Image (spheres, rainbow, N blue to C red):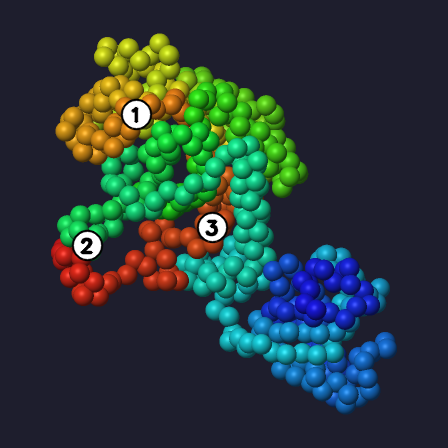
Amino acid sequence: MRVYATDIVKKEGEEIELIGWVHARRDHGKLVFIDLRDRSGIAQVVFPARGGSLPDGGRGAPGENASTDNAGDLRLEYLVKVGGEVKKRPAKMVNDKIPTGAYEVSAASLEILSKSEALPISVDGDGYDIDEEVRLKYRYLDLRRERLRRNLIVRGKVVKFIRDYLSQRGFIEVETPLLTKSTPEGARDFLVPSRTQKGKFYALPQSPQQYKQLLMVAGIEKYFQIARAIRDEDTRGDRQPEHTQLDLEMSFTTPEEVMSLVESLFTEMMETFFPEKKMKTPWPRVPYSEAMKKYGTDKPDLRKDKNDRDEIAFAWIVDFPNFELDKQTKEIQPVHHMFVQPKEGSVELIDKDPLKMTSTQYDWVCNGCELASGSMRITDPELQMKVFKLLRMSEEKAKKDFGHLLEAFTYGVPPHGGIAPGIDRLLMILLGEPNIREVVAFPKTGDFRDPMMGTPSDVDEKQLDELGIKIVKD
């Protein structure tokens, strides 16, 4: 019966089977030791040398262990299946550095499932000293290292926790399209040409913003999804061209209700998976004007000791302005996006002094990083059209780009609001990683490349012809 490496501590005296990679190998003449690694961790396996026998009451006499005679052929990263009995190690051979260090498997059988060439990168250690371009080229090997495996395991557990938490509170998980319409929402779109409608394009979603608002019109009331957001904007340490966010929206809600939900969700998540972290609750709420005046930023680092990686300072930034002037063009632009509902008492300022409008926006920040922006949404088509025009969008273009949303709002739209916390960025902070790529299975480089797959790549001329596209080179 196959068991995972870390489970041998519960199997003393039992015959078990392990499957995993040879993480380390030590040939001591009469005995061959390997550290066998699987997704759970490492277990030591001991083999008799060819034609030998195991000491201390091991199986058989010399010559009776033919099923392990190939132990001497083992090399690093060979994939093997081992059968044998779990025993306690001799006291002087206990390894306190690993959870299985007091036990070992006395091998009775060995099958080499797959051989391995010498690896182009080491998978032992944390990997920080290896050139990142090389690590990403061999990412399928890089992910064998304990640190990255742990990151992916924690990520999976956190996502499941989020799903369970929201589902138990009446939220419905709904998937929205990845092929959508290109609209001016802020960041640059990635475009996908249509083969059947030549000359027309889909866009990959910057976020499910419009779809989740339309789900509120549909009466879903409480929606969420673990959503992919894809934006053609420059990368940096905490940003990738595609990222994962918890996207949620609620009807008949308030900013306080949304913030309280997020706060309770992630406080419970922290207590479950990161109990060693020091976190102050309740999370403080800091007005935007105070944050800018006191800290010079709308994502302040509120930690008392900024060198303490276990201190997590969550906070809400509230009372944002609806609009601001672009520093270069001096043109008016939204602080968050063009669908943010102004606070009560600010709506009428759109015709008089829009820069003095206060919005319902609320940002979740942590240790100097923005984790999420949320707000109540505009549901009045007339007010939404005023915002479009304020942002230099003609009525004709507004109807062309957002006519579906404006029309939907004429059919009994409920008041609604939501938020979209970034899962990658949150885990980067909580796992103490230097950049977001360390918590993503297959990330891109800083210039949008995937060295492993060789993307972006050229395509056949036939594919371009089918799409009606010609490449014009400078």
In which quadrant of the rendered image does the C terminus lie?
Answer: bottom left
Which amino acid type corresponds to the residue marked 1 in the rendered image?
Tyr
Q: Is residue 334 left or right of residue 248?
A: left
Residue on which disc 2 sits: 196
Front position in the image: 138 or 337: 337
Q: Are marks 3 and 2 in contact (CB under 8 Å)?
A: no
Q: Secondary structure at mark 3?
A: loop
Kind of residue indicated by mark 3: Val
Q: Which residue is mark 3?
A: 440
**Image location (x, y in percent) of residue 140:** 48, 63
Give the distance between the C-alpha atoms of the residues marked 3 and 1, in whole angstroms: 41 Å
- Along the viewing direction, whichever of 163 and 75 lies nearer the viewer: 163
Q: Secondary structure at mark 2?
A: loop
- Residue 468, visible in the rendered structure: yes
Which mark is in front, 3 or 2?
Answer: 2
Residue 59 sits in quarter: bottom right
Q: Is residue 99 left or right of residue 228?
A: right
